Amino acid sequence: MTLKERLRADTNEAMRAGDTSRRDVLRMMLAAVKQEEVDGQKELDDEGVQSVLMKQAKQHRETISDAEKANRPDLVAKEEAELLIINEFLPGKLSEEEVRAAASVTIDELGANEMQDMGRVMGQLMPRLKGQADGSMVSQIVRELLQT
Protein backbone atom coordinates (compact mmCIF):
# COMPACT_ATOMS: atom_id res chain seq x y z
CA MET A 1 0.00 0.00 0.00
CA THR A 2 1.44 3.34 -1.03
CA LEU A 3 1.51 6.27 1.33
CA LYS A 4 -1.19 8.06 -0.67
CA GLU A 5 -3.42 4.97 -0.55
CA ARG A 6 -2.86 4.75 3.20
CA LEU A 7 -3.91 8.41 3.57
CA ARG A 8 -7.10 7.72 1.61
CA ALA A 9 -7.88 4.56 3.59
CA ASP A 10 -7.31 6.33 6.91
CA THR A 11 -9.53 9.20 5.74
CA ASN A 12 -12.34 6.76 4.96
CA GLU A 13 -11.83 5.03 8.30
CA ALA A 14 -11.98 8.37 10.14
CA MET A 15 -15.21 9.25 8.32
CA ARG A 16 -16.79 5.92 9.29
CA ALA A 17 -15.68 6.39 12.89
CA GLY A 18 -17.07 9.94 12.98
CA ASP A 19 -13.65 11.38 13.89
CA THR A 20 -14.06 14.75 12.18
CA SER A 21 -10.83 16.34 13.41
CA ARG A 22 -8.71 13.43 12.14
CA ARG A 23 -10.69 13.33 8.90
CA ASP A 24 -10.09 17.03 8.33
CA VAL A 25 -6.32 16.75 8.90
CA LEU A 26 -6.09 13.76 6.55
CA ARG A 27 -8.09 15.62 3.91
CA MET A 28 -5.74 18.60 4.29
CA MET A 29 -2.76 16.30 3.75
CA LEU A 30 -4.36 14.72 0.67
CA ALA A 31 -5.17 18.18 -0.70
CA ALA A 32 -1.53 19.26 -0.27
CA VAL A 33 -0.37 16.12 -2.10
CA LYS A 34 -2.90 16.68 -4.90
CA GLN A 35 -1.84 20.33 -5.22
CA GLU A 36 1.81 19.30 -5.56
CA GLU A 37 0.85 16.77 -8.23
CA VAL A 38 -1.12 19.37 -10.17
CA ASP A 39 1.68 21.94 -9.89
CA GLY A 40 4.33 19.44 -10.97
CA GLN A 41 2.05 17.78 -13.55
CA LYS A 42 3.08 14.32 -12.37
CA GLU A 43 1.96 11.65 -9.94
CA LEU A 44 3.98 11.62 -6.72
CA ASP A 45 5.62 8.45 -5.45
CA ASP A 46 5.98 7.71 -1.74
CA GLU A 47 9.11 9.86 -1.50
CA GLY A 48 7.31 12.81 -3.08
CA VAL A 49 4.30 12.38 -0.78
CA GLN A 50 6.66 12.17 2.18
CA SER A 51 8.31 15.41 1.08
CA VAL A 52 4.93 17.17 0.96
CA LEU A 53 4.05 15.84 4.42
CA MET A 54 7.40 17.03 5.81
CA LYS A 55 6.60 20.52 4.51
CA GLN A 56 3.20 20.32 6.21
CA ALA A 57 4.84 19.24 9.48
CA LYS A 58 7.34 22.11 9.25
CA GLN A 59 4.51 24.61 8.70
CA HIS A 60 2.71 23.27 11.76
CA ARG A 61 5.87 23.52 13.89
CA GLU A 62 6.34 27.13 12.77
CA THR A 63 2.70 27.92 13.55
CA ILE A 64 3.09 26.36 17.01
CA SER A 65 6.15 28.50 17.65
CA ASP A 66 4.35 31.66 16.51
CA ALA A 67 1.24 30.80 18.55
CA GLU A 68 3.35 30.27 21.66
CA LYS A 69 4.93 33.70 21.17
CA ALA A 70 1.45 35.19 20.75
CA ASN A 71 0.25 33.43 23.92
CA ARG A 72 -2.43 31.44 22.08
CA PRO A 73 -2.68 28.10 23.92
CA ASP A 74 -5.86 27.20 22.02
CA LEU A 75 -4.08 27.42 18.67
CA VAL A 76 -1.00 25.61 20.04
CA ALA A 77 -3.15 22.68 21.18
CA LYS A 78 -4.94 22.46 17.82
CA GLU A 79 -1.71 22.59 15.79
CA GLU A 80 0.02 20.05 18.04
CA ALA A 81 -2.88 17.63 17.61
CA GLU A 82 -2.70 18.03 13.83
CA LEU A 83 1.10 17.60 13.89
CA LEU A 84 0.72 14.29 15.73
CA ILE A 85 -1.49 12.98 12.93
CA ILE A 86 0.95 14.15 10.24
CA ASN A 87 3.86 12.53 12.08
CA GLU A 88 2.10 9.14 11.89
CA PHE A 89 2.84 9.15 8.15
CA LEU A 90 6.46 10.27 8.35
CA PRO A 91 9.46 8.04 8.98
CA GLY A 92 10.88 7.95 12.47
CA LYS A 93 13.19 10.78 13.39
CA LEU A 94 16.79 10.17 14.34
CA SER A 95 17.90 11.10 17.84
CA GLU A 96 20.43 13.86 18.39
CA GLU A 97 23.09 11.25 19.20
CA GLU A 98 22.44 9.42 15.91
CA VAL A 99 22.66 12.67 13.95
CA ARG A 100 25.86 13.58 15.81
CA ALA A 101 27.38 10.19 14.92
CA ALA A 102 26.43 10.54 11.23
CA ALA A 103 27.85 14.08 11.18
CA SER A 104 31.11 12.90 12.76
CA VAL A 105 31.50 10.16 10.15
CA THR A 106 30.82 12.61 7.31
CA ILE A 107 33.29 15.14 8.73
CA ASP A 108 35.94 12.42 9.00
CA GLU A 109 35.24 11.18 5.45
CA LEU A 110 35.66 14.68 4.03
CA GLY A 111 38.60 15.60 6.25
CA ALA A 112 36.70 18.72 7.28
CA ASN A 113 38.19 20.64 10.18
CA GLU A 114 37.03 24.26 9.96
CA MET A 115 33.84 26.25 9.56
CA GLN A 116 34.61 26.89 5.88
CA ASP A 117 33.95 23.19 5.27
CA MET A 118 30.39 23.38 6.65
CA GLY A 119 28.82 23.67 3.19
CA ARG A 120 30.59 20.55 1.93
CA VAL A 121 29.66 18.60 5.06
CA MET A 122 26.01 19.66 4.91
CA GLY A 123 25.92 18.86 1.17
CA GLN A 124 27.01 15.30 1.87
CA LEU A 125 25.08 14.78 5.10
CA MET A 126 21.60 16.12 4.31
CA PRO A 127 20.83 13.66 1.47
CA ARG A 128 21.73 10.81 3.83
CA LEU A 129 19.43 12.12 6.56
CA LYS A 130 16.58 13.31 4.33
CA GLY A 131 13.29 12.95 6.14
CA GLN A 132 14.96 11.56 9.23
CA ALA A 133 16.31 14.71 10.87
CA ASP A 134 15.45 18.38 11.07
CA GLY A 135 17.82 20.48 8.97
CA SER A 136 18.30 23.12 11.65
CA MET A 137 19.33 20.48 14.19
CA VAL A 138 21.79 18.94 11.71
CA SER A 139 23.23 22.37 10.95
CA GLN A 140 23.67 23.15 14.64
CA ILE A 141 25.41 19.82 15.31
CA VAL A 142 27.76 20.20 12.33
CA ARG A 143 28.60 23.72 13.44
CA GLU A 144 29.41 22.47 16.97
CA LEU A 145 31.57 19.63 15.67
CA LEU A 146 33.53 21.88 13.31
CA GLN A 147 34.18 24.47 16.03
CA THR A 148 35.80 21.96 18.40
Image (spheres, helix red, strand yellow):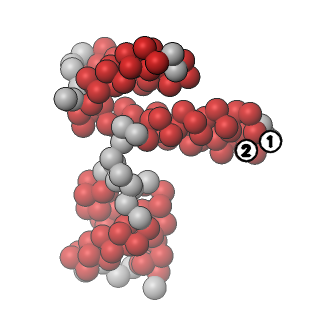
In the drawing, does residue 73 fall left or right of residue 61?
right
Q: Secondary structure at mark 2?
A: helix
Q: Residue 50's spot in the image, x, y percent?
A: 32, 36
Q: Nearer the viewer, residue 11 or 68?
A: 11
Q: Which residue is mark 2?
A: 68
Q: Secondary structure at mark 1?
A: loop
Q: Is residue 133 above or below residue 16?
A: below
| Residue located at (42% from left, 78% from top) | 145
Q: Nearer the viewer, residue 103 or 16?
A: 16
Tell me the amino acid under the disc marked 1: Asn
Q: Residue 136's spot in the image, x, y percent?
A: 48, 57
Q: Which residue is mark 1?
A: 71
| Residue located at (74% from left, 33% from top) | 74
Residue with the most extreme right position: 71
Q: Is residue 39 above or below residue 77?
A: above
Q: Is residue 27 above or below residue 113?
A: above
Residue 123 shows in the view:
no
Tell me the amino acid under the disc marked 2: Glu
In the drawing, does residue 41 fall left or right of residue 148?
left
Are the two marked residues, 1 and 2, in contact with CB atoms closer than 8 angstroms?
Answer: yes
Q: Quadrant of residue 98?
A: bottom left
Alpha-carbon neighbours of circle 1 within 10 Å: few (<14), some, or many (≥20)? few
Residue with the most extreme front position: 17
| Residue located at (37% from left, 67% from top) | 99
Q: Quadrant of residue 44?
A: top left
Q: CA distance from mark 1 to mark 2?
A: 5 Å
In the drawing, does residue 79 fall left or right of residue 71?
left
